[in-house]
Image (spheres, rainbow, N blue to C red):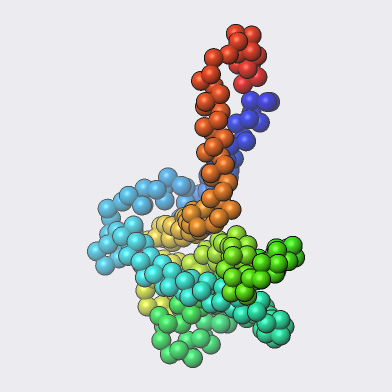
Amino acid sequence: MKKINKIFDHKWASTLLWIVLIIVVWEIAATVVAANNRSPENILPHLYQILAAAFSTDKVSQGMTATMVVLTSARATILRALVGFLLGITAGFLLALVMKLSGLLEKMLFPYLMLIQLIPVLGLAPIILSITGDINSSRILIAAVLSFYPVATNTLAGFKSVDQDKYDLMYTYAAKQRTIYAKVLIPSAIPYFFTGTKIAAPMAITASILVDTLQGDGGLGCMLSQSLRHAMSIYVFWLIVFFSAFVGILSTYLMTWIEALVSPEKRGIRRARRENRKKIVSCRKMPVCPQIGLRRRKAE
């Protein structure tokens, strides 16, 4: 049991276990669906069938294979989601900064932020489209609207998390308001900001795909709806589902990686880990008494 617990202390072991469980459950469900004569098999195909469709050279639409259809459509969808995401996180950070500067503005704006977030995307899309009059602009704005709320709320929480002792220290140095924000508030809010971006990035991609299904004109959502209507292979639908999940997970890991690069706290943790590794390596290279070495090997 100790060896098993030691194995599952690693993140990769837990992730691998979940992947295996999902595959087993999926295959059991696909077998049940295939055994039911009243249900078409491609409603829930086996994973090997989806994998075979990904590498198939059969043309499914406009002389393109299923994989080519997904990748071609993904370029437009991801580009719109990226632009909307960047606009959303920029607006969210600036709005949190404004609300921190003025408590009156926070009381006025914060309830409306919650109301905007509660509006469903299906209801928001026609409203923004009627305002902008352009399909691409409306998709970008919807991705931005869904992105800026988690960033604004988390960044504002980061501004409010600063201890009073830090304010008192800056006041004893007669620091200006600009210095307090640059040296104390913004560095303290960075982890909260990236927590918001990790939530917002998958939401921007999901919103872009969902709006594509409503408004057409290309994109992953448009191909998804066409595949469900059997205008092309149903495996295009499943490839889009898996591709979207992969992009959403990748976006979260990308935000984690960027946070590790720019966050002072993360850099300090990495530096401390490197120093600890060097100390451990140097200690292991030192000559030791045979009895002490035997005890250490048993402990390891």
Q: Quadrant of residue 187?
A: bottom right
- Looking at the picture, how far across and down is residue 161, in whole percent? 70, 64
- Looking at the picture, how far across and down is residue 97, in whole percent? 61, 76
Q: Is residue 89 above or below residue 251?
A: below
Q: Nearer the viewer, residue 53 or 271?
A: 271
Q: Is residue 79 above or below residue 295?
A: below
What residue is at 43 percent from the left and 69 percent from the top?
82
Q: Residue furthest left?
A: 63
Q: Quadrant of the C terminus?
A: top right
61 displayed left or right of 241: left
Q: Nearer the viewer, residue 27 or 155?
A: 155
- Looking at the picture, how far across and down is residue 153, in whole percent? 65, 71
Q: How many marks?
A: 0
The answer to whether residue 33 is visible is no
Q: Is residue 103 above or below residue 168?
A: below
Q: Quadrant of residue 133?
A: bottom left
277 displayed left or right of 222: right
What residue is at 51 percent from the left and 20 percent from the top?
285
- Looking at the picture, how far across and down is residue 54, in whole percent? 36, 52
Q: Quadrant of the N terminus?
A: top right
Q: Quadrant of residue 292?
A: top right
The answer to whether residue 175 is visible is yes
What residue is at 47 percent from the left and 51 percent from the top?
45
